[in-house]
Amino acid sequence: MEWELLPIPLFIVVSIGLNSLIAVSGVVPSAFLTAINVSMLGFGPGVLVSILGEAIGAVLSFWLYRTALHRYSSPKGERFKRLRDTQGGEAWFLVLGMRLMPFVPSGLVTLSAAFSRMSLLSFATASTLGKVPALFMEALAVSAALRLTIGWQLILVVIVVCAYFLWRTLQRSGEKI
């Protein structure tokens, strides 16, 4: 099914649903969905739908993680220990800060927050506010990339894929980047 064939209201519902599934998975990047939203709806509406979808997905993930996984164990690692042990304003600012940091896995932040003592409302506001700048940057990059010719888009994809694999290789070898 092609996206152009969907009526706009249905497209928005499907996009928000896909964003929620991506957030619950915790490992699938949502950049491709932001690209589709921006190309189909335009920059402003596309970003707003992406923000709404990611916010709903994060809240749904938080709730699912807290209710289903809390009884089994908690995520390991010093990086997220502070978040698990906090509540109130401190937890709010930790979630906000982690959402603002590039390359911090969204699913791991949500999972750690679910094991913390912060409320769902506190998590929802901090998480959503933290995602807004990243989504704007993502949408700006997508908008610029969509204006390129197919050849330049392919070159850009190759560069991004190579940079990712280089980053992962250096990360595994213990090199600081």
Image (cartoon, rainbow, N blue to C red):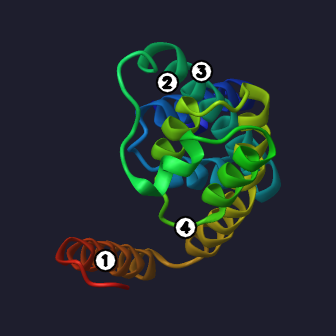
- Of residues 90 and 139, the one nearer the viewer is 90
Q: Decide if residue 5 is in sight here.
A: no
Query: SS of the residue at dot 3?
Result: helix
The image quadrant where one finds the N terminus is top left
Question: Label 1 near label 2: C-beta < 8 Å?
Answer: no
Query: SS of the residue at dot 2?
Result: helix
N-terminal-most mark, 2 or 1: 2
The image quadrant where one finds the C terminus is bottom left
Q: On residue 63, which mark appears?
A: 3
For disc 2, the marked residue is 65
Question: Eyeballing the image, is 9 above or below 104?
Answer: above
N-terminal-most mark, 4 or 3: 3
Residue 140: percent from left, percent from top: 68, 70
N-terminal-most mark, 4 or 1: 4
Q: Crowding at label 4, few (<14), some or many (≥20) Cα neighbours within 10 Å?
A: few
Residue 106: percent from left, percent from top: 51, 48
Q: Crowding at label 3, few (<14), some or many (≥20) Cα neighbours within 10 Å?
A: some
Residue under the image location 66 percent in, 62 percent down? 100
Residue under the image location 49 percent in, 50 percent down? 80
N-terminal-most mark, 1 or 3: 3
Alpha carbon separation for disc pair 4 and 3: 24 Å
Query: SS of the residue at dot 1?
Result: helix
Could you tell whether 53 is left or right of 154 in the image? right
Q: Amino acid at mark 1?
A: Trp
Alpha carbon separation for disc pair 3 and 2: 6 Å
Could you tell whether 156 is left or right of 94 in the image? left
For disc 4, the marked residue is 102
Question: Eyeballing the image, is 177 above or below 70?
Answer: below
Question: Label 2 near label 3: C-beta < 8 Å?
Answer: yes
Instruction: State which mark lies toward you, 2 or 1.
Output: 2
For disc 1, the marked residue is 167
Q: Decide if residue 40 is in sight here.
A: yes
